[in-house]
Image (tube, grey):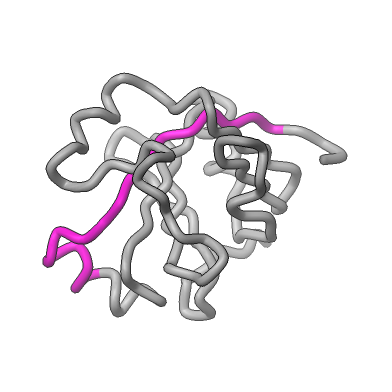
Amino acid sequence: MEMISTGLDGRPWPEFLFDRRPVLVVPAAPGRLPAPEDGWADRDTALALTAGPRPSWSAVLDESRLVIHRPGGEAWFDGEIGVTREWRRAVRAHRTLLLVTGPFANPFEFTAAVGAGRLLLLTTPIRLDSGI
């Protein structure tokens, strides 16, 4: 049986876009503040995401451990996420990951952040690996 994270514990949780591309929804955390100069897009600049993933970012998924590096190589996220086989397949097929973050700590607050237009988005290259 594969675990699916609910985000209720404040950890990121995997989702899919309507076309089955992988998304990671990342609640706000003190060590994970999104910096606009790193390429995050808001609702007014979201069309910038159509240009493709940010080459200065990278992500590696090894089993259930995901490591995301921001520009300069500093880890923006390093931890376990609840992934399914289907999500791993989507990562393998698309090789990009949409990160969604904003002022929310759990799924209940996520809806309010969406409604207020306060989400930030970034697309990063991602690869599957073993032995990060």
> Total number of numbered labels?
0
**In the rendered view, does 116 fall on the left or right side of 87?**
left
Looking at the image, residue 4 lies above or below residue 14? below
Determine if the magenta segment contains residue 113.
Answer: yes
Residue 112 is situated, as x and y percent measured from the top left of the image, at 19, 73
Looking at the image, residue 23 lies above or below residue 130? below
Residue 2 is situated, as x and y percent measured from the top left of the image, at 65, 59
Residue 69 is situated, as x and y percent measured from the top left of the image, at 62, 41
**In the rendered view, does 9 fall on the left or right side of 22?**
right
Residue drawn at (22%, 68%) of the image: 113
Residue drawn at (53%, 80%) of the image: 9
Instruction: Indicate the quadrant containing the C terminus: top left, top right, bottom left or bottom right.
Output: top right
Q: Quadrant of residue 17?
A: top left
Instruction: Name the one closer to the observer, 62 or 123.
Output: 123
**In the rendered view, does 60 fall on the left or right side of 95?**
right
Determine if the magenta segment contains residue 124.
Answer: yes
Instruction: Name the one closer to the observer, 86 or 67.
Output: 67
Looking at the image, residue 122 lies above or below residue 66? above
Residue drawn at (52%, 61%) of the image: 32
Residue drawn at (51%, 23%) of the image: 55
Residue 85 is situated, as x and y percent measured from the top left of the image, at 61, 44
In the image, farthest residue toward the top: 51
Instruction: Indicate the quadrant containing the N terminus: top left, top right, bottom left or bottom right.
Output: bottom right
Magenta-colored span:
111-128
